[in-house]
Amino acid sequence: MSAEPDGPEDRLRRFATIWSRAVFPVTSTSLTRPEFEELLLPLARRLRVALLARAFDAEEGRAVGAALVRAHCTDPEALSRALDCVEAYLVLYCGEDGPQEELRLRSSRLQHAMAAGFAQALRERTLAEQEAIARAALQAQGVVALALHASEARFRAVFEGAAIGIGIADLDGNVLQVNGALQRMFGGGEGAFRARNVKDWTHAEDAPQVWKLYDELVRGEREHYHVEKAFYRPDGTVLWTNLTVSLLRDADGRPQYQLALMEDTTERRLLNLRLRYEATHDALTGLPNRTLFFERLEKVLAAGEGQRFGLCYLDLDGFKTINDSLGHAAGDRLLVEVADRLQSCATAPGEMVARLGGDEFVALTTGPNARHEVDELAARIMNALLAPVRIEGRELTVRGSIGIVEGAAGERSAAEVLRSADITMYRAKSAGGNRFELADPEADARAITRHGLTTALPAALERGEFFIEYQPLVHLGDGSVRGAEALVRWLHPQHGILGPDRFIPLAEDTGLIVPLGRWVLEQSVRQARDWRERYGDGVPLRINVNLSPCQLTHPGLVQDTVDILERAGVAPQALCLEVTESALIGADDDLLKPLRRLAEMGVDIALDDFGTGYSNLANLRRLPVSVLKLDRSFTQSMQQFPADPVDLKIVEGIVSLAHSLDLAVTVEGVETGAQAEQLRILGCDTAQGWYYARPGPPERLHQLALVDATG
């Protein structure tokens, strides 16, 4: 079946075509190029599946690399060209419009896996060759000394035709013979080898055990050893090899020669280094990325006793605005400039700068004086950001917020340190930005608790962890109950009962306040119906429910309220919605429209916490409110006798104004009989507070022994 033009299969076929054209010239195969392309097509399909899979599987990449060796693509140039094709075209033809940065990172990891699979398969193939050569060498171990013509011819064929380097030396290290492959690896003739002793071929990066193993072999204490070793070529360049050295014995079992088999791994090593660099460095700025930073931080935190560290977590202020207004290209140039400046700030030993992603950077310092040095590092960073950055003819002001964490090694994990720095950075940003803050364990604990509560909120509503308590509203004239305010609580599995101040702001930030508010309204209206049906007219029918600013702007507020009242069979006059004064400051007609519609239906609207904002008394006439709830701050001085005369005059004036506008006045926070008496004299209509009753379950409300407000 033919592939749909420009469909996934057609794009996959184009990728395989490009791959085959790049690699075919350096392969040792009897296939034609179209036949070779058909061979690569299933490998390309495996790469596409691995690129788009939900979980990354390095085994797929290794399998593709091994398959290249089986297809006779054993030349290092074939691997290099294959990896270049994957890097340039895999995401382009097989990415299917996925997240580009994530796909490029996965493509890089696939290249690394392909290289590892290729190397493993090639090594296994080489070892098979080495084993065959070693067997031939052992069979011909008396050839040099005895000059047996037939055996020497057989050995010579293997010796000269092998693709790996082979050298034979005596036990003193004098080179006797080398094959052509070894001469080509080193770039010199056989004479250059005969002039040197094996022990002269030392390299600065030799592992300590290399020459120990060599001495054991020439003494006859071991038969062979295998190591990774570097050599200097005559031109000064470095040759990296997989080196296997075997001991050859004579017919009586006495050590006689040493046989060296060398596989050139220089290109593979350079490729691995390149892939390692790409996997641990940010492609845009060249700085170490999150992976390398975590490796370094974990090493620092694992240091011995007495070692200290300091970390600066930087987030640019207003970077999103620059990105949105000038475009991502300008944003990238800004990030590159910031990275250069940060790099210039961290030049001392033990200091490091990395980009975690987006506009977030970290700077790390270590040493016994880290407490002092990290403060200086943060100050240098803030100073480095002062100079404007010129991009596309504009001078951009760069500012940043920094969270600083300092401490002793071994006390916390890398994730805990970074989380503390992140929390502290956001505390600096919340304080206005363009500053740095030091980590505070108590502030961290509060932020972590806040995050935990925020995360648990949605499930808490589904599990029914919220409940409502009711506090009665008492008429100050006769002490009768006229209503009750619904107050939501959260019975948290770990933290116990939480008041609304602990979770309502979180619900507003996450948008959960709308379904939570709807649930509170529904439960409260249903409770008002139950009171009426169970206890008749002697129990309050009016229920007060708080509305948050987010609920006011929700388009379904009016319809939700109507539906809830109708389902419960409760009249709108039994409901009072409380809205804070601050939510209505400067409110336009669009915001007031749903409140007006509810008021026209008969729902009372109360202006809660009146007097705490910038109260515009003249503005009361345009608000659809019927009740003023006076904040407790105005009546605190009335708890004792005599009350502050200034407070009395203020309350008296507010009550008089409210009554002149046909508004009822409710007072919050009544805690003493003296307070209640003063408020009754001043003309307040209703009150609530601990003097009458604390919030409680609905079953208790009708049983409360309420005190007559007159005395």
Image: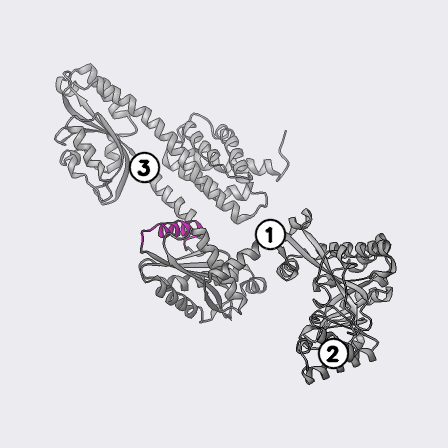
Q: Earlier in the sequence, mark 2 or mark 1?
A: 1
Viewer-proximal residue, 146 or 585? 585
Residue 378 location, x and y as percent? 41, 66
Q: Earlier in the sequence, mark 3 or mark 1?
A: 3
Against 709, residue 218 (above or below) is above
Q: Quadrant of residue 263?
A: top left
Q: 33 or 578: which is nearer to us?
A: 578
User: Of the residues shown, which amino acid type is indicated by label 1?
Assistant: Thr
Check disc 1 and report its element: helix, strand or loop: helix
Which dot marks residue 678? 2
Hey, which quadrant is residue 129 in on the image? top left
Quadrant in the picture for the N terminus: top right
User: What's the mark number on residue 351?
Assistant: none
Quarter of the C terminus within the rendering: bottom right
Residue 236 at least partly seen: yes
Q: Determine if the magenta segment contains residue 55.
A: no
Judged left or right of residue 12, residue 75 is left
Q: Residues within 10 Å of mark 2 (few under 14, many from 20)?
A: some
634 or 54: nearer the viewer: 634
Label 2 residue SS: helix
The label number, if any, that marks residue 455 in the structure image:
1
Residue designated by label 3: 265
**Measured Cα–Cα span from mark 2 to mark 1:** 46 Å
